[in-house]
Amino acid sequence: MKKILIAYATNAGSTADVAEMVKQTIGNKTLQAEVKPLAEASDLAHYDAVIIGAPMIIGWHREARRFLRTHREALSGKPFACFLTAMSLTETRETAIDGIPVQVDPGLAQAPRNPKRLSPKELYALPYNYVHPILKSAAPARPLAVGLFGGSLNLFTLKWPARIFVLMAIQARPGDIRDEAFIKNWADNLRSQILKNWLT
Ligand SMILES: Cc1cc2nc3c(=O)[nH]c(=O)nc-3n(C[C@H](O)[C@H](O)[C@H](O)COP(=O)(O)O)c2cc1C
């Protein structure tokens, strides 16, 4: 039986639930799916495919970028994909970044006020600015897909500097905008791509 690892980083816990949603969809009788925090996922040799998920915490979670840099060689030899959770994203309707297919949760993306003149916050939150550093950390390994999902933000769990950053710099509104149907649909499509990848 083939094995797939869904490894995640998290700051406040909600990305762990997203990893579980992916597992529930992608695992089946012939594909055994396992969820682990990144800190517990050191040996990728046991897995035939890998999915790495993490929140945007002033860039994709540091631990996740480090994980990609450490394991880029192992990831080159098997299908892998990434996802991020976030509270702010500028809508651009891009379907690929650096040639990698990206799938954006429409509930997360927000149209810029003036598409001809983006505000600093809208520039910061461009899909390219979120995804390009992820791809750079993984290179030369290239993910099959990158999912950009709405996340969950509770200001009461944050220390003051983080609260101020989230409110002022990214102007994120607290709440839970995770879209289970979108996440599961993403995982379903990804399973087909992974199966196809094994056959070619
Ligand atoms: C310190 C901090 C920085 C964040 N930076 C960003 C960001 O740059 N862009 C964004 O869209 N969301 C940002 N967020 C929102 C988180 O990505 C979002 O709340 C995510 O779902 C949290 O996942 P977690 O519960 O697994 O930690 C930030 C949140 C915190 C606390």
Image: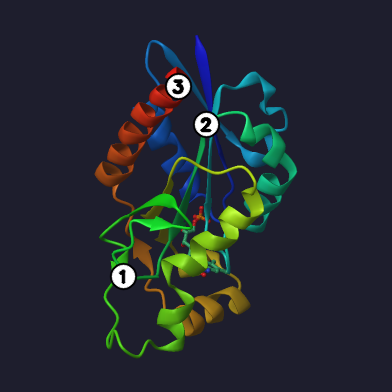
Kindly state the secondary structure of the residue where label 2 is placed.
loop
- In which quadrant of the rendered image does the C terminus lie? top left
Q: x and y percent of residue 173 in the render? A: 37, 73
* Residue at the disc numbered 1: 91
Circle nearer the N terminus (2, 3) = 2
Q: x and y percent of residue 193 in the render? A: 38, 31
Q: Give, as a three-letter code, the residue at label 1.
A: Glu
* Residue at the disc numbered 3: 200
Q: Nearer the viewer, mark 2 or mark 1?
A: 2
Say which quarter of the image contains residue 95: bottom left
Local crowd size for mark 2, using a 10 Å CA cut-off: few (<14), some (14–19), many (≥20): many
- Separation of disc 2 and disc 3 at Cα? 11 Å
Q: Give, as a three-letter code, the residue at label 3.
A: Thr
Q: Is residue 102 visible?
A: yes
* Residue at the disc numbered 2: 79
Numbered tag placed on residue 109 in the rendering: none
Q: Is residue 13 left or right of residue 109?
A: right
Kindly state the secondary structure of the residue where label 1 is placed.
loop
Q: Nearer the viewer, mark 2 or mark 3?
A: 3
Q: Nearer the viewer, mark 1 or mark 3?
A: 3
Q: Is residue 121 above or below residue 199?
A: below
Local crowd size for mark 3, using a 10 Å CA cut-off: few (<14), some (14–19), many (≥20): few
Q: Give, as a three-letter code, the residue at label 2.
A: Pro
Q: Is there a contact, CB below 8 Å, between mark 2 and mark 1?
A: no
Q: Is residue 41 visible?
A: no
Q: x and y percent of residue 88 in the render? A: 40, 70
Residue found 72% across the figure and 27% down from its top: 43
